[in-house]
Amino acid sequence: QVQLVESGGGLVQPGGSLRLSCAASGSIVSITAMGWYRQVPGKQRELVATISRGGTTNYADSVKGRFSISGDNTRTTVYLQMNNLKPEDTAVYYCKAVCLGPDSWGQGTQVTVSS
């Protein structure tokens, strides 16, 4: 199994930036892709961005041009650079590892965009 630990959330003003990190441990050789999702109360969890083991990225339309997903050389840590944040980006952000076995989720980190 893969364990994921997120960090980097917090409170930021509109227009500001945050960088989220997600560190994977355990059966990392089984990871085929990693991604970030977000959820607000009363709504379904939605995709924000994903990156495959080969480096192919995918973004939700709502974050294109503002957010950037990347991974380190070992493919054990994935980052989400969030720029020009908007109040509607406020959510709990979750890291996900797509694995050959069962997928894994992190515990989530709160991002609040407010003045």
Image: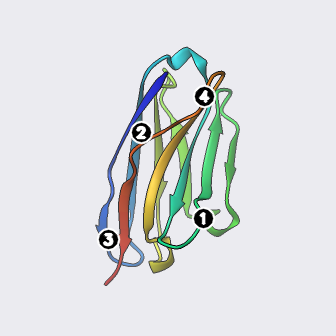
Q: Which residue is mark 4?
A: 102
Residue 63 placed where, x, y %? Answer: 60, 64
Residue holding disc 1? 44
Disc 3 is placed on an element classified as strand
Q: Which element carries disc 2, helix, strand or loop?
A: strand
- Look at mark 2 in the image and give the residue it sits on: 22
On the image, the x and y values in percent for residue 15 come to 42, 76
* Residue drawn where x is 67% and y is 60% of the image: 60
Identified by mark 3, the residue type is: Val
Q: Which residue carries the number 3 mark?
A: 12
Residue neighbourhood size for the residue with mark 2, other residues' Cα within 10 Å, grouped as few (<14), some (14–19), many (≥20)? many
Q: Earlier in the sequence, mark 4 or mark 1?
A: 1
Residue at point 29%, 69% (across, down):
11
Q: Amino acid at mark 1?
A: Gln
Spatial CA span between label 2 and label 4: 18 Å
- What is the three-letter code of the residue carrying label 4? Pro
* Callout 2 amino acid: Cys
Q: Are marks 3 and 4 in contact (CB under 8 Å)?
A: no
Q: Would you say the residues marked 2 and 1 are in contact, meaning their CB atoms lie under 8 Å apart?
A: no
What colour scheme governs how the chains and residues are painted in the rendered image of this protein? rainbow
Return the x and y of residue 44 as percentages of the image width and height: 60, 64
Q: Residue at x 63, y 39 (%)?
A: 51
